[in-house]
Amino acid sequence: MPSTALSDPVDLAPVATRLTVALIGNPNSGKTTLFNALTGLRQKVANYPGVTVEKKTGTFRTQHGEEAGVIDLPGTYSLLPQSPDEEVSRDVLLGLLPGTPKPDAVVCVVDASNLERNLYLVSQVLELGLPSVVALNMTDQAAALGHAIDAEELARRLGVPVVPMQASARVGLAELRVALSGRLRAPDYKPLPLPELVEQAVESLRWELPNALDLPPSATRAALVLLLSDEQTGRLAEGFGWAHLTPRFRQSRAALSSKVPGWQDDAISTRYGRIGEICDGVLARAEAGADGIAPSRTDRLDGVLLHPVWGWLVFLGLMALLFASIFTLASYPMDGIKWSFDKLAALAQGAMPPGDLRSLVVDGVVKGVGSVVVFLPQILILFLFIGLLEDSGYMARAAFLMDRLMSGVGLHGKSFVPLLSSYACAVPGIMATRTIEAPRDRLATILVAPFMSCSARLPVYALMITLLFPPETASAGAKALVLLGMYALGTLTAFAFAWLFKRTLLRGKPTPLAMELPPYRRPSWRTVGTGILDRAKAFLRRAGTVILALSIVLWALSYYPRGQDAKPDERLAESYAGKFGKAIEPVLSPLGFNWKLGIGLVGAQAAREVFVSTMAVVYAVGGEDEKPPEAEAKPTADAKPATADSGIAAGAGVVPTPKKDEPKPEADEDETRMKGVADAMRADRWPDGRPVFTPLVALTVMIYFVFSLQCVSTVATARRETNTWRWPLFMFAYQTGFAWLAAFAFYQIGRMLGH
Amino acid sequence: MDSPSPPAVARLADLPPGASGVVTAFHGDHADTKRLRELGLVAGTRVRALRWAPLGDPLEIELRGYRLSLRRAEAELVEVRPEA
Ligand SMILES: Nc1nc2c(ncn2[C@@H]2O[C@H](COP(=O)(O)OP(=O)(O)O)[C@@H](O)[C@H]2O)c(=O)[nH]1
Ligand SMILES: [Mg+2]
């Protein structure tokens, strides 16, 4: 078992002698498929400390029925890491990661249809001396591509068992279990010879390594791996007395580079030299492009999908389809969710006596959470799409098509999916950045994603566009044009800020692309389904925790303190939220906003669409005079701020809304309400009699909403995905600050031009 | 000579689509090409240029039985001996 200093009691089985197996392999070699097949549902997902890398652990039974632990390591091409994911994989194997015991055995998952490149990592792992088994996966795909592999001879040359598999069909699973059930032996694999001076350097470094590495022969090779890792030496291990080692390794590297020029390059090419020897006579591959070989399916598909004309048509068609599904298809289940939450609110409303507690449950909990959960269908559709594109091999092609545009502003080809997703909602958009390996590119994408106008802004835009045009003169075309302008504004700003960040905060050498274009294949429903389920769970977990808590806070701010028998709008004005709105009026008046808009902005801070329902309360739409005294400020179950045609059933949000006495038919009510709010807002005057909502102010409000980060879910997601508060707080500050400046400049220039 | 024969050395970025070559050397720092080498693009490896993306970058190549894309800036660092 691993040294106790490193082990985390949570990760150790009750039986102290339990075997732990790590699955390691190139990305897309089938590790997760194998992991799922081995563990069934006995698995859990957490994060590695200090990095945003998913840690998947589980248990399975060996052929003898003994329980064993298994870790699904992040995909990696090499033990010399180039991303946090790869660093985690290396450090787990070396036993360097706090909280994760060093594995007792390793399963190297190999994509048989790409044997040479996969053996690069395998040969690095075997040199570490840990007991290992090679899972020769995707044998079906290798056969389909005309690659023939002699597995027995491969096993002999590698000195470890080789189990041919097809993990997606559970073929070879029993054989793998058997291989893991016998006596575990170190591989009978001869490490590559090293130049004399390198050997000496590694030999002396190994004695300085922490205890965990102190098991010959692996310590020497572990030292070599770390020496060759360049600047990525032991960053994650700094927790336990690593700090002094980093400079030691740096010195050693510098000394070697001057004495043995090219020693690092040679380490790579001699390894491929050895792989060539191993594959000679073991792997027979029909050379691509050779005479008499028909072009493969991948050849033919690439010819179309990467074609200068057809390629773009297919790409644009797919994106249009995605958009259409998110905004139309999703509206049906969203209406359903909206309806259920409304019914739930009505139920609670009827079952509980009036009072603080009822308002908390109805307005704070049910509506607050409902207003976020309503986006679940969009998120599911989005991830279904992403999953299908990813699993079929098309995603890499889309990144290939888009890379030029994206790299122009310092983003990555793979940034386009997260940005596209953010038109629906920044939360799944930020979650989708996980496919970007380069940390700086990923961070830049996260930082600008909220600029893409999400669907929660639509109700706000709709209300403001209504205010923008005098009731009789509004043409649908002009309205659509304004809306399109807002989308364009956000998108261009996202690119501009990405460009800026990559030149300032996130400056560095451009990350190389080096992206694999996998063979096309039929997507596996199981893989896609598991992926969707994971996302849905993560989203709902957040809705049930962070978002719930914040909803309650915002509810309290707009509910307390309770004045006596005041009208709802006056009550709101006297609440903490109302006082806050008044307090920030000096900040808002340069933008042409009054304190009532201020309350709306406070409400929108939880979720943007809440703005509309808050405005409805502030402008007391809904005839409070006719209300029986007891029913006033009674939250409504039918407040529905979204426009009927937007397809977005935004929740009523967290602000108590006055109840209408006679519910009108649903469809009318939406438009009536939106129009009612707009009319009331249009009638609002400054103390000096000027109208508050001039077209200039309506546009200024929209501009503010395009830019400012007002969504707690986005902030919470960015916190989770960057594993620090620093970036979400920075995002919040710079976007809100920029929103204010842009709105200020726009309003003041508009005033100067006489509007 | 009448028929133009391929030049003795060229950059990977200069290989016309469909043409093959053998990697001979690398330019730039070790770190610039480290990942490309680790992915199997080492001296002596046979590569085939497949196509440029419609916007002119990146490049799709084939090596060791699989496909990889890399940007022009990286392809400029790889020296190849074109094959007829
Ligand atoms: N044809 C084939 N596909 C497989 C096999 N094993 C896994 N896959 C598919 O390969 C893709 C990548 O698998 P995954 O487990 O996510 O790879 P990971 O990145 O290594 O975790 C998924 O679509 C799997 O369904 C196999 O043996 N044969
Ligand atoms: Mg995986």
Image (tube, coloured by chain):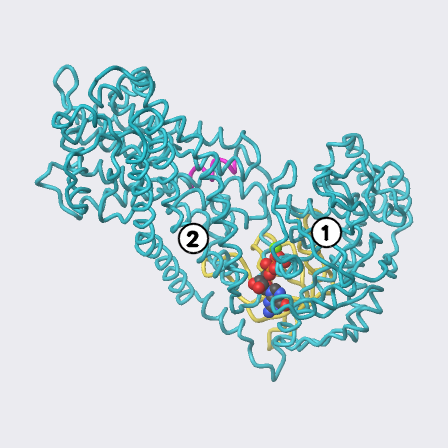
Chain colours: A cyan, B yellow
In the image: residue A351, left or right of residue A2: left
The boundaries of the magenta stretch are A495-503
Q: Nearer the viewer, residue A153 or A396?
A: A153
Picture quadrant of residue A298: bottom right
Disc 1 marks a residue whose amino acid type is Gly
| Quadrant where the image shows the N terminus of chain A | top right
Q: Is residue A345 left or right of residue A533?
A: left
Both on one chain, marks 1 and 2?
yes
Q: Most extreme residue toward the left, as rendered?
A: A472
Mark 1 chain: A
Image coords of residue A316 (percent x, y): 37, 59
Q: Are marks 1 and 2 in contact (CB under 8 Å)?
A: no
Task: Give the amino acid at mark 2.
Answer: Leu
Is A82 on the left or on the right of A326, as rendered? Answer: right
Q: Is residue A417 magenta?
A: no
Query: Which residue: 69% across, 57% down?
Result: A25
Residue that numbered label 2 is attached to: A380
The answer to whether residue A12 of the structure is visible from this angle is: yes
Which is more toward the observer, A2 or A111?
Answer: A2
Q: Residues within 10 Å of mark 1 (few under 14, many from 20)?
A: many
Mark 1 — residue?
Answer: A69
Q: Earlier in the sequence, mark 1 or mark 2?
A: 1
